[in-house]
Image (cartoon, coloured by chain):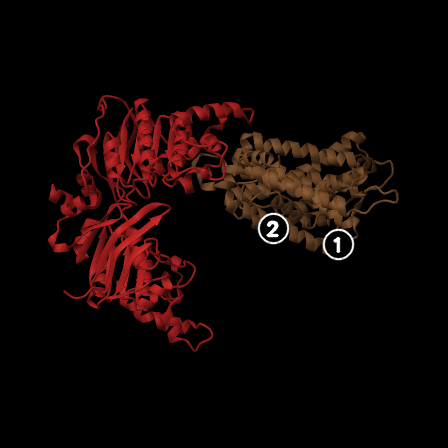
Amino acid sequence: MSIPVIRSFISFWKRMNGQKQDAVKSLGALAVIFILAVLVSPTTATGSNIFLQLGNLTDVLRQGSIVGIISLAMTFVILTGGIDLSVGSILALSTTVVALVLTRWQHGPSYPLEIATAIFIALLVSTTSGALSGAIIAVFDVQPFVVTLAGMIGIRGLAKWLSNNANVDVGFGQDVASTFAAIFRGKTITIACYAILAAVFYILLSRTIFGRYVRAVGDNERAALYAGLPIRRVKLWVYSLSGLLAGFAGVLYAAENHQGNPNAGVGYELDAIAAVVIGGTRLSGGKGTIAGTIIGTLMIGVLTNMLRLNNVDSNVEMMIKGGIILLAVALQKQGRQAR
Amino acid sequence: MPNPILQLSEIDKSFDGTHALRGASFSLFRGEVHALMGENGAGKSTLARIIAGATSADNGKLLLEGSPVVINGPRDAQRVGISIIFQELDLFPHLTVAENIAIGNHQFSRQFKQRRFVRVADLDSFCKPFLDQVGLTRSPRCEVRTLTTGERQLVAIARALSMRARIIVMDEPTSSLFDDAVERLFKLIVELKRQGVSVVYVSHKMDEIFRICDRVTVMRDGQTIDTRAIQDVSPAELIRMMIGKEWQSRDRKPIELSSEAILSFSGVTTAKLRDVSFDLRKGEVLGIAGLLGSGRSEIGSVLIGLDRCRQGRISMHGNHLSIGSVREAQTAGIRWVPEDRKLEGLMMQMSIQENCTISDLGAFSRAGFVKRKREYNRTMELFHGLSLKAASTDLPVSTLSGGNQQKVLLSRCLLANSDLIFLDDPTRGIDVGAKEDIYKIIEQLASQNKGILLVSSELPELLRCCDRILVMREGAVAAELTAGNTTQEEILTFATQAPAQVRGHA
């Protein structure tokens, strides 16, 4: 009985293209980690599994959301064959800007308008930062690593300079800043934002002309040039989007932590890159999916949660994460060679 | 007759199932300059690389001074005194002249064995005699990227000499040299010969071969056809040997001379082209023949705005044409199929369908969203017409054979329905069946009154597909021939010989 099942699975597998095969593989890996997390999870006094509690599962999602949002746009950047190291600093800049506007602007028109304006300014600053990197990369044809490394350092400096190197605290009262934090720190809001953005970026990559161009540029830039594609515009856009999403993640971060923090987001660029790579996107560009990146984000989230529930030392946690990244890449490489 | 210093027999070599060499044989005497001739793809470069140990043969014997040797890689070749100078000169641009000569050099390591560190003075003293010998006047301490191509060639030769090379293989050494540098190279070769060094000279330039070579071996389709002493052979005979059997040009309805010109070049001059003029009429296939680097591909580059037109005028449908980018060219109704489908044409990881439509997604989309159903239907229609075989159009284009990949690239032109199509060697490296399919596509396009420029390395192909053939030589039009009234011999004569010689033979 099992043989026909296996056979039909094999033929199903063969009919899928490589990208779908990769997606199924990543999903399988996520399932394995999930089951492992359930198995090793401690239980409450009443015997219920802590990992599977709704509160815990939504915590996993919420904790993954901020880096998850950054990694959506990072997928686009990496697909074009680039990299964006400046996202952690842009996040810090955004937290600082949104908190500064809300705490310093004493007599705004109305709370909603003031909150909207603050968010708008933070996103504008962030998008501009990304667009600037994109413009330098596209027009002067400089390596993205170098340009965004400069951005990472310079923008961090800007965030610290704006806030005099101190946190901009957002209170818990009735003022506009506190109201902003109360709204945007909700679990539902955070998770919903991630889910909506994930859907938008999924459609953007898989259904639009822009998405095609992004993959084409990373697959073979020279061929893309000869095919008449607007390479510079594509690059400008992906880095702008990366800035925009890092800025948005910064807004959520400020609300969640009740502060604008110029030292926030250190190392987030690497976490985002890790999620993208674990999700099966090739670092040299051209191949990858948003679904993969979401799976990668969830894998890291579940893994972290599992280790923390079991009180594993946070240093050991880092070592295990490093190992997982290598393992994920090794598995993908093997799959490619077999094909 | 003395014993040959090097003898190769029954050499076979294949790459991915296609035979590059079949039973090739070659012998070389001491102090001889021996030319290897043949059309593009005849196997000259492969044979040269096997001699120099840069590629290993699948089968066959290699005798060095009568005893069998196995040359595994450049280090082995250096040990036995064989050196190759590649067409593209494999020097390190950011290292100095002296460093380039000394790097990986057994002689240098032996001479300065006791030193732990490399001293600049040692480098200078090591290189000096060889640089003097080749006549390079630049300092050994300047970086190679500051040198002209001719000077780099001299560095490469000095490097070979410093390795005590007895055999030097030169792969089309004059392809990127100017006249004075060519003269200097020839003097040097004569000097090397006097010192007993043997030179294998890969070229298809007739005048050079008759000037400096002692013997010539002609290759065709991976086989060595014959070896002759240069004084016993005429250029015409060599060309006949290179071509082999004579091909019939096909019957095609002649183009009406009155029909309107789609494209006109008049006196077009770019960095690579000199005063190129021609007309392309509606429904005409105009072939462009010429050796690699003759400017045949550059006609395409200027057409799509990759190269700037410095002088002269390009007009399309009688209107002056000024193209700044590929996109502009596409809008003007020009499509270009690049020479190297893997590096310049296709996105290998993207699907077959995506590769077909990438330049024309606007036609399948609304508000930036791709209508995939419409895209699928249109591409399926095209692929049926092209007899393109694929399990699914969702598979990456890399899973297709070379011929089918080329069809995908051509399908972009069909999809766009543009007036003018420039095909750069569209049948390179694909099998016979796929070639026929591509010829049919070309015919079909011509019958739709489009103008087609077809660059090809294969003369039979040009004779079969084209109405007229433009022969390019050193960036200029050497001849404009009618396909029905010409022969491969005539084309090759124009492509390989200096103008004076052509007149002499005519």
Rendered position, B377 above or below B145: above
- SS label for mark 1: helix
Chain containing mark 1: A
Nearest the camera: B34 or B144? B34
Instruction: Indicate which disc residue A168 carries.
Output: none
Where residue B290 sits: x, y (%)? 26, 41
Identify the amino acid type marked 2. Answer: Leu
Q: Secondary structure at mark 2?
A: helix
Q: Nearer the viewer, residue B238 or B152?
A: B238
The residue sitting at 27% across, 36% down in the picture is B288
Q: Residues within 10 Å of mark 2 (few under 14, many from 20)?
A: some
In this rendering, the label closer to the viewer, 2 or 1: 1
Observer able to see residue A226: yes
Left or right of B277 in this view: B404 = right
Which quarter of the picture shows residue A30? Answer: top right
Question: Which quadrant would the N terminus of chain B be assigned to in this image?
Answer: bottom left
Residue at 66% over, 40% down: A295
**Quarter holding residue A250:** top right
Report the chain shown in brown. A
Q: Residue at x 54, y 34 (%)?
A: A11
Q: Are marks 2 and 1 on the same chain?
A: yes
Checking the image for residue A149, the label placed there is 2
* Residue at the bottom extreme, as displayed: B114
- Give how far apart the Cα atoms at labels 2 and 1 are: 27 Å
Q: Position of residue A77 (x, y in %)?
A: 58, 41
How far across and how far down the image is residue B93, in percent?
41, 58
Q: For the residue marked with disc 1, what is the amino acid? A: Ser
| Residue B180 shows in the view | no
* Marks 2 & 1, CB-CB < 8 Å contact: no
Image quarter hosting the C terminus of chain B: top left
Which residue in the protein does label 1 denote?
A314
Residue A155 percent across, percent down from the top left: 66, 47
